[in-house]
Each structure stands twice: as C-alpha cells, then as structure tokens.
Amino acid sequence: MAAGIREKQTVALKRMLNFNLPPIKNSTGEPVWKVLIYDRFGQDIISPLLSVKELRDMGITLHLLLHSDRDPIPDVPAVYFVMPTEENIDRMCQDLRNQLYESYYLNFISAISRTINRPDITDTEMEAIMDTVVDSLFCFFVTLGAIPIIRCSRGTAAEMVAVKLDKKLRENLRDARNSLFTGDTLGAGQFSFQRPLLVLVDRNIDLATPLHHTWTYQALVHDVLDFHLNRVNLEESSGMENSPAGARPKKKNKKSYDLTPADKFWQKHKGSPFPEVAESVQQELESYRAQEDEVKRLKSIMGIEGEDEGAISMLSDNTAKLTSAVSSLPELLEKKRLIDLHTNVATAVLEHIKARKLDVYFEYEEKIMSKSTLDKSLLDMISDPDAGTPEDKMRLFLIYYINSVQAPSEADLEQYKKALTDAGCNLTPLNYIKQWKAFAKMASAPTSYGNATAKPLGLFSRVMNTGSQFVMEGVKNLVLKQQNLPVTRILDNLMEMKSNPETDDYRYFDPKMLRGSDSSVPRNKNPFQEAIVFVVGGGNYIEYQNLVDYIKGKQGKHVLYGCSELFNAAQFIKQLSQLGQK
C-alpha cells in the first residue's frame, strides 16, 4: 500500500509537470522543455519521489527556488509548485510583471485558503496549523482517489482535524462540477471494493514512545544520525595525519547517502534489530568477495597456455561462466556500493551505541514500560558518568515518570532532579510532563505498553567473523518481542471493529453521508482491509515499525502511517522544553 501511494504521488507529479495533461512530446519525439519553480516545501515533496534524471527526461531543463534570483527565459514555459502563501503569490505576480517566462502553469501544494481570496477573514495561529494539516490530508485522499471513514478521539486536536476534514470532503463532494473525486483525472482509486479507514490520533495519547531509545536499524539511524528526506549525512574522518606536534586525526569529511526504496538491503533490514543488520552487512561483504574471487579465478584460467585437450575443454567450459560473470558485473558493482554505504552508516550508528550505552538504555526502558523488575536503580543509571548523554538520561527519567502508576513523592522527585541537574540535564521538559500528567489524570490510568520485554542473549563476544568491520564486544544482543504500542492497539480495535473502552467513544465521520452526525457508533460493521493512521502532533519510526510488524500477521490488510511532522527524540525533547517554559 505504501508503494501504491508513492506510485500515485509520482503519477500526480508527472502529470503536473506535463501541464496537467498526459505526457506530451513535440513533433521530433522529445518532451516539451520547461522550467520548474518550487519553494522549499515543494522541493521536499519532489526530491524523494523524482530524481534529477527523471526530471530531465520529462523536459525539466532547470529547477529553481521561487525566491532565488532568476534570469528571464522568455521562450520557455514555467511550471510552479508551491504552497499558497501570500509571500509566494506576491513573488509569482512579480514574475508575471517581469515577463520572465513564455507561459505560467501554477500548481499549489494545498488548496488556496479563503484568507487569501478574502483578506477580511483572519484565523488564529492554532486554526491555521489545523487548516494546514487538513489541507494536506485532503490532498492526500485526492491523490489516493478515495473517501475515507474517519475515526478520532474526543476533546483533542485530532478531533478538530477530523471535523474540519469531514467538512472539507463534504463540500467538495457536494460540488459535483468541481469535485476532485470524480472523473479519471488520476485514474481509479485503489480502494475499489471498500473505503479506507482514517484513524486520527493525538500525540498526547502516548508521550513515552517518542522518547524511547530504539533498537531497529531505521529508527536508530533517525535517532542518532542526521537523517532527513531519506538522506543520511555523516561526518567521516580519513585516518591520521602527521604534523610537527605529532599524529592527529585528519579533518572530517561530510558525506551523504540516500536510503531509498531502490536500496534492497535497506528495504529488507530497516526494521531489523541492529545486531542482525551488522551481521547481514558482514555476510553480504563475504558473498561479494566470493563472487569477486570467482571472476578473478576465471580470468586467470582464460589465460591458459598450451593446447592440450584438457586445457581446451576447460577453456570452453569457463568461457560461458566468465561471460555470465561479466554480464552480472553491474549488479556486482551496485552490490559493492550498497555494502560500502551500509558499512559506513552502521559503523556510525555502532559508535553511538557504544559511546552512549544505548543498548543498556533500550533494555532498561523496555523493562519500565512493561512493568518488569529493574536490575539497577534509576538513580544509579542517571548518576553513571559513563552511560549516555544528559539528553539520554532525561529521556529515561521522563519515560519512568510517564509510566509511573503513582507519581514519585516530592522527596524522591527532588532527589531525581538533583541527580539529573548534576548530570547536566535541562529540567524544563519535566515541567510540561508534570502538567500533562496532571491534566490527563494519567496517575491513576497510565498508558499500557504490554508486558513483553527485549530478551538479552548475552553479550556479543564474536558474533562476527574475524576481520569484520563491526567490533560488537560489550554490546548486548537484544532480541525484540512483538508488543503493540498504544497507536497500534487503537488501530487494531477500530480496524477489526472490536469493542474496547479505549476506543468505544471514538467519533465516527462518513463524509459521503448527506447529514453529518455526532456519533461514535459506526454504521459499517465489517472489519476494514485498508487503513491510514495519522498522528496529530508528530510521529516517529518506532510507531511506524510497530505498525509494519503488526500488519505482517494480518493477511490481505494494508496500513499507512502518517504524521503532522516526523521527529526524533532530540527534536521532541526540544519541543517539550519549549512547552515547559510556558
């Protein structure tokens, strides 16, 4: 299903780049040459979906930012792909006045708000944020070609989004002439027999998961490295250099790697526990070396001298093998590129794991969240100068505080706060979590995270073969046990139409019904086959992977995960800190 929506988004973009028409070529069979103008938002949408080569194949000779200095190209059409902000519209009007291009094709990423068409209408900042989320979801379902059934919790920002989205979908469906859900503009929707379920959940239902140290490859890359829009940026030092003062590390080089759906290793292992990934990289490397040695051996045999019958027979036998080996050379080179890429990325992750003892944090937090017996006191963990950064310690304590059935006494809390301060922690995130816990009455009913914990298989001694790039000694070989996180549990209840106190009160919206109703009783009694989970307030790769693992056991069902923003724990802590200062 994820591949399905990615494909639909790509089709929609390609159609837009062809002036919203089927692919056009001129009389010579070449595409119509054009300029693409986008803002940062448009750039972030296009770059993971279309490569520079694909853009060029579609006739895009130049792609420029809207607010950059641009020279006139009066004989070429321009395709714009921008957010409908006043600043962007003013700049496009300026382009028109300056006659920069031959013709102008304006495409807005979301619907133009009434505020732009009618300046007398003003929105509060909160309303504006909600409208942005609603516009994005509306555009998503237009691309998907399907009208969802909407479920959401009451009294949250998710409910505000649900009400607005339901209204927007209704208004568009009512306007038959201009409805975006009729005709074959984007082809038939993939949900031909049953409509999808949209589950809108609020970040406040689970504040522990975004803080949790993780153990799977993709989530670790996002947590500890600079990973954005499928690209990871690394700093790599290139050995030592001599100087008058002696040897010192060479200057670090910045390198970027794309982790895309075309990367087979990434697709296969991004949800795997990190030790498995390290082992798989090593196995891939050994497989590559064996293939490389075979090619070298065949080349050596091909240089046989003499004309005895055995040599000639061997020569003819190996010619076919060498031909086969040479034909697979591009595939072999691509395999080597991916091995090098993941060796570098996994090594960078491993450095963080060892330096910060992230395996210890992950295991300890799993025990807290599953209410298991702790083998070490929380104060000892916080006070250990060799275990983790101040941020790691703060994340651990917040998870403990959120999951406490009863909040620590004032005396205990002061003791924890002193240990955190001594460790260099900023305590402002705790201020917000205390308020949140009080308002949500979480002290009497904390969020359940199941009772399965990560099982250690002992420390790595030599899991890797001799000569491995990964020295895993001292790192715990933790095996993950499947347990449903709160978001996954909510989805399961709603998708399977289960009665559960956690979701029985969720509101129900059907934009296709003539009259909206304030109901939590679903009209549709059949389990859903397709669902979209959207987290208002931000999501993370831990929840995404949990949903992926959940759906593996549900044959024929598909789930997409989306969020208003995708943040890692450091970014989430920063947000909590800002909230704690208010």
Image (spheres, grey):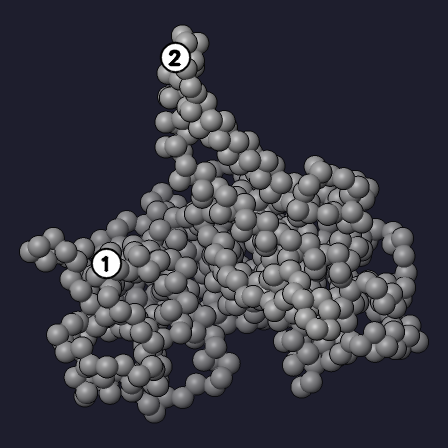
Q: Quadrant of residue 570?
A: bottom right
Quarter of the image that includes the C terminus: bottom right
Percent coordinates x, y for residue 30 in the rendering: 14, 56
Give 471 or 19, whichever is nearer the viewer: 471
Q: Is residue 369 visible?
A: no
Mark 1 neighbour density, 10 Å: few (under 14) some (14–19) many (20 or more): many
Percent coordinates x, y for residue 506 in the rendering: 56, 60
> Considering only order in the chain, which callout, 2 or 1, is on the residue closer to the N terminus?
1
Q: Residue 387, which numbered label?
A: none
Q: Which residue is mark 1?
A: 58
Q: Which residue is mark 2?
A: 307
Q: Amino acid at mark 2?
A: Glu
Q: Amino acid at mark 1?
A: Met
Q: 533 above or below 329? A: below
Q: Secondary structure at mark 2?
A: loop
Q: 343 above or below 70? A: above
Q: Residue at x 50, y 72 (%)?
A: 160
**CA–CA distance in space, label 1 to label 2:** 56 Å
Q: Is residue 376 left or right of residue 2?
A: right
Q: Quadrant of residue 16?
A: bottom left
Q: Residue at x 30, y 56 (%)?
A: 54
Of badges 1 and 2, the one in the foreground is: 2
